[in-house]
Amino acid sequence: MDKENNNPFDAQKKPVYAKNVIAVASGKGGVGKSTVASNLALALKQRGYSAGLLDLDLYGPSVPMMFGQHKPTESVSQEGILPALKYGIQLMSLGFFLDSNSAVIWRGPLVMRAVEQLLTQVVWKKMDYLIIDLPPGTGDIQLSLVQKIALSGAIIVTTPQDLALADVKRGINMFEKVNVPIVGIVENMSYFLCPNCGHQSFVFGQNGGSRESERSGVPLLGEIPLNENIMSAADTGCPIVESKPGGEESTAYFSIADKVIEYCNKG
């Protein structure tokens, strides 16, 4: 860590341990944001880059279950908390310090204090990409978070449903207020692909992500199908990009990762 700056996420510069910091956000919950963040970090690792994943979704931390990792490390260094290492990427989540059945019912000041600790007291090894899984929504907590974090860019996850797309607009507006560039939109649960006949069923609507991309002038990074294998892989602690990197289900995540790499290389 930078000995001259107690906050490695000083808004005036990027953290010394990550070349690129990408936030994964959503205007509402339940759109698969954490699944996208987890598989994106793993896809970047599969592409040969060092990567980390910071779970700041304090009210619903998903990383412990998705990675089958329920504590940060066996020890704590003198400098701070050591992140866990799983599937070749560094992991940190508030969920590591909570009972799995505990509900986080903190008010804003307590939430921000916990976030400050996660941002300043974790001793990361240097990496190419740090993916940050933000809480869903566009309220004061989310706005405060993105103001504290020096981001390379943000990805907004949505579904094709009109209700979710309305929240995309608010998410874009939030990042614009703090001058954080939008890398692009990811449309999750784009369609259900029947495993027997291959028929595509557009359960939540069709082409919503592409329409919002055109309206807002923000790139559409990818469309991820509603897939049983993706969901079961996350539930069993080994996300699909790690469990089946060569499978058809992982293709969309690798395509998104390639676009993130291209975006960061241009910067």
Image (cartoon, grey):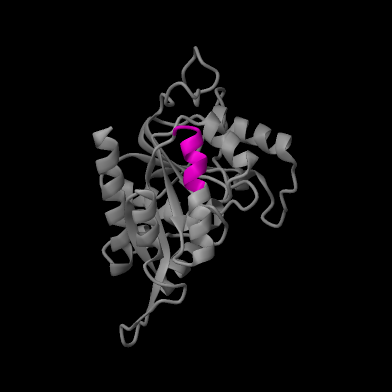
Residue at (60, 46) in percent of width and height? 96
Q: Is residue 148 left or right of residue 125?
A: right
Do we see residue 46 in this rendering? no
**Residue 261's image quarter?**
top left
**Residue 51 in magenta?**
no
- Farthest residue in the front direction? 215
Q: Quadrant of the C terminus?
A: top left
Residue at (72, 53) in percent of width and height? 102
Residue 193 or residue 49, whichever sits in front: 193
Do we see residue 192 in this rendering? yes
Residue 139 on image: x %, y % = 62, 44
**Residue 7's image quarter?**
top right
- Farthest residue in the bottom direction? 197
Identify whether 184 is placed above or below 161: above
> From which residue to which does the magenta span run?
171-179
Q: Main secondary structure of the magenta part?
A: helix
- Farthest residue in the top direction? 4
Count all numbered tags in the image, as a single digit: 0
**Residue 178 in magenta?**
yes
Q: Is residue 66 left or right of residue 196?
A: right
Q: Is residue 106 left or right of residue 222?
A: right
Residue 181 or residue 236, whichever sits in front: 181
Identify whether 57 is placed above or below 201: above
Identify whether 221 is placed above or below 119: below
Residue 111 on image: x %, y % = 68, 38
